[in-house]
Image: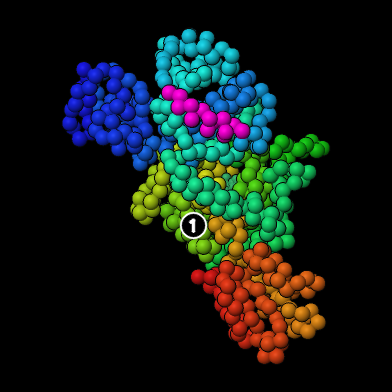
């Protein structure tokens, strides 16, 4: 007999070899049905793994967070088993559970196509109905290597484990996988699942190694939960900026133009221009000075700044001509340092805030490129603020607050604030411990003093200093950085920046790097997703669509209206195509134009307009002047 201690402290005796499922069953049959796995002495145990010794137990039920992981991890094995049945030569990389499901990286010996997922899913269903028990066994490393000798990926994974490690295997029917475990006892417990998509994935994320195929799926405990999740996924797909960008003709990506090199179409460019004006005014009010610097710099400039040592991986290759060496800039900071140096500075001049809408290029890994979200040519709402040490906190805080104001004006939702620090063990950061300690401490203090709730990420700092990043969630569910404030003691040193202090001596300024609302590319992806393509009126590429009921009878008045709106700086368009009225209205709706104006007899006779606001079914008739001032007010208030 063994003694099992429950979370409430009570102790019960059971036969040696009892399982979580049986213990749950001894309490109630309801609990048995709800049980998924458990913790024995803190170790994750399968539903049916025999418990051999005394210990504490915690049963994981379907309601617990970990239950979803266990189920999905087991579903990944089920997927691999099904693939192996269909593709007997298949070899397997890794197959973990993830936030919303699971995946498995597979080399099937032939290419799996999107349409093959249906047949793989059917096979999974069949294996689930076979009700195969999932059992754990253990092997010494040497024997495990022998067991998996035909699967080079598994061999590599096992080889990386420490000598003497006991390796656990999981078996279900004819299929055995290398796995740490936490499984759900039987394939019969994996019933509600769906295979979702197929992607390429390099073995161990290394682009120099084999490309495997990654199959994504999701598994749930009930049909309803699965259905609900699939609904969420389909809504998300509708919100995906890549889809909306195509439908609304915002941008184009073409293999011929180059991957990650986005082309802005008229509608997208209009929004970008509006945003540019907006940023210019906002920065003017906040005391920024606007400058313009080139996209190209000498290699030497980036050697001085340290980008060459710490950021070269992300840079396009150098260009050489007539003995000169140039690089396409990945950031504007070095140029801004030179601008600072263009005059003698006194302590009274500081802070100096240089802002620029900066076009820059980064060589991002091709697998990481994603629509407008991560590109290789990008234009950043950038600034570098030069301050004295006693001005750091105030200027960081002001920059941060300006960012919050911009995000509020744009009506965007922040996921969380992140403090990104250095990982000392990594070589990508400059290595002056004193500067790092000083700058990290400053940001930590500031966030505490201002009660700014945040998460800390070690290793995500810039190579020159720590940063406060403002994170948003994308439609596809991952988190990206929108805005950033970064503290930098390094570049002033590297560029030997000075100002004359009140003591008449030379002092070093400190630099704050600030990305206001990201790059136009990433910002556009965020706007499209958060607004589902329906831009607020002040940002909309076209604000008003004027549609005459009959070209002949109402075309002239419609044109007069359209011209008037344009004179009032409203972005209005006239639809004079020889199409049916219904078609034109639908078209304006598809393009999510805020105001659709249908012009018929009533309007012509009474100097009125009848409009319909996007998203509303209601038709409203008002005097032309009232309509104009209503839209103007809405634009100035940014819809707030
Ligand atoms: C803020 N030197 C600083 C600048 O002064 C800098 O470049 N910081 S950065 O590297 O963090 O980039 C600024 C912002 O650009 C990021 O916060 C992110 O919003 C955006 N960005 C970065 N890489 C990409 C990319 N590949 N595609 C689109 N936007 C990007
Ligand atoms: Zn910078």
Which residue does the numbered mark 1 point to in the structure image? 413
Q: State the image coordinates of residue 353 (x, y, percent, origin top left).
A: 55, 58
Magenta highlight range: 119-133
Q: Is residue 14 left or right of residue 277?
A: left
Quadrant where the N terminus is found in the figure: top left
Q: Is residue 387 left or right of residue 90?
A: left
- Residue in front for this viewpoint, 281 or 181: 181
Residue 399 among those drawn in magenta:
no
- Residue in front for this viewpoint, 625 or 519: 625
Residue 184, placed above or below residue 319: above
- Residue in front for this viewpoint, 16 or 252: 16
Point out the residue furthest to the left here: 10
Q: State the image coordinates of residue 93 (x, y, percent, origin top left).
A: 56, 24
Tell me if the residue at label 1 has its CB under 8 Å from ligand 1.
Answer: no
Residue 124 among those drawn in magenta:
yes
Residue found at x 65% / y 52%: 243
Q: Main secondary structure of the magenta part?
A: helix
Residue found at x 57% / y 34%: 121
The image quadrant of residue 289 is: bottom right
Residue found at x 65% / y 47%: 371
Crowding near pointer 1: few (<14 within 10 Å), some, many (20+)? some
Number of dots carrying numbers: 1
Residue found at x 60% / y 39%: 197
Residue 502, placed above or below residue 422: below
Which element type, helix, strand or loop, lies under badge 1?
Answer: loop
Q: State the image coordinates of residue 563 (x, y, percent, origin top left).
A: 74, 79
């Amino acid at each position: 007999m063994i003694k099992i201690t429950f979370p409430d402290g009570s102790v019960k005796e059971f036969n040696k070899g009892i399982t979580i499922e049986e213990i749950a069953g001894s309490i109630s049959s309801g609990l048995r049905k709800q049980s998924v796995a458990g913790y024995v002495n803190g170790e994750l145990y399968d539903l049916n793994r025999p418990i051999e010794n005394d210990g504490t137990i915690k049963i994981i039920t379907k309601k617990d967070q970990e239950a979803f992981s266990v189920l999905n991890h087991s579903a990944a094995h089920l997927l691999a088993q099904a693939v192996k049945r269909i593709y007997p030569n298949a070899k397997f990389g890794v197959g973990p559970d993830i936030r919303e499901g699971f995946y498995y990286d597979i080399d099937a010996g032939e290419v799996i196509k999107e349409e093959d997922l249906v047949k793989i899913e059917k096979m999974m269903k069949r294996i689930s109905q076979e009700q195969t028990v999932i059992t754990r066994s253990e092997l010494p490393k040497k024997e495990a290597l022998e067991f998996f000798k035909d699967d080079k990926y598994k061999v590599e994974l096992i080889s990386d484990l420490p000598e003497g490690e006991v390796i656990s295997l999981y078996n279900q029917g004819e299929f055995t996988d290398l796995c740490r475990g936490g499984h759900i006892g039987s394939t019969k417990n994996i019933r509600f699942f769906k295979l979702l998509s197929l992607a390429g994935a390099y073995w161990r994320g290394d682009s120099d190694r084999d490309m495997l195929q990654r199959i994504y799926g999701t598994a749930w405990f009930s049909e309803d939960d699965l259905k609900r999740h699939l609904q969420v996924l389909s809504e998300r797909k509708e919100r995906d900026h890549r889809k909306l960008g195509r439908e609304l003709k915002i941008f184009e990506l073409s293999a011929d133009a180059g991957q990650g090199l986005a082309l802005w179409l008229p509608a997208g460019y209009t929004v970008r221009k509006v945003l540019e004006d907006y940023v210019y005014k906002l920065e003017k009010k906040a005391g920024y000075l606007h400058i313009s610097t080139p996209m190209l710099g000498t290699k030497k400039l980036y050697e001085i700044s340290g980008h060459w040592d710490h950021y070269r991986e992300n840079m396009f290759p150098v260009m050489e001509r007539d003995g000169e060496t140039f690089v396409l800039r990945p950031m504007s900071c070095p140029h801004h340092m030179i601008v600072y140096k263009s005059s003698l500075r006194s302590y009274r001049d500081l802070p100096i805030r240089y802002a620029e809408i900066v076009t820059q290029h980064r060589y991002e890994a091709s697998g990481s490129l994603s629509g407008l979200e991560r590109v290789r040519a990008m234009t950043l709402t950038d600034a570098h603020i030069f301050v004295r040490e006693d001005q750091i906190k105030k200027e960081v805080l002001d920059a941060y607050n300006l960012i919050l104001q911009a995000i509020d004006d744009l009506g965007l939702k922040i996921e969380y604030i992140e403090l990104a620090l250095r990982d000392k063990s990594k070589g990508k950061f400059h290595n002056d411990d004193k500067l790092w300690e000083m700058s990290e401490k400053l940001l930590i203090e500031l966030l505490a003093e201002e009660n700014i709730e945040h998460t800390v990420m070690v290793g995500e700092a810039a190579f020159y200093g720590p940063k406060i990043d403002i994170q948003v969630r994308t439609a596809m569910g991952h988190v990206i950085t929108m805005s950033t404030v970064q503290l930098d003691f390094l570049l002033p040193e590297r560029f030997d920046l000075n100002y004359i202090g009140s003591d008449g001596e030379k002092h070093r300024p400190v630099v704050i790097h600030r990305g206001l609302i990201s790059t136009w590319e990433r910002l556009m992806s965020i706007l499209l997703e958060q607004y589902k393509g329906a831009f607020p009126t002040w940002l909309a590429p076209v604000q008003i669509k004027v549609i005459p009921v009959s070209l002949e009878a109402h075309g002239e008045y419609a044109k007069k209206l359209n011209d008037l709106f344009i004179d009032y700086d409203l972005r209005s368009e006239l639809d004079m195509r020889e199409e049916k009225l219904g078609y034109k209205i639908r078209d304006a709706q598809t393009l999510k134009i805020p105001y659709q104006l249908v012009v018929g007899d009533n309007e012509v006779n009474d100097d009125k307009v009848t409009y319909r606001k996007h998203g509303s079914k209601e038709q409203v008739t008002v005097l032309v002047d009232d309509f104009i001032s209503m839209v103007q007010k809405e634009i100035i208030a940014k819809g707030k």
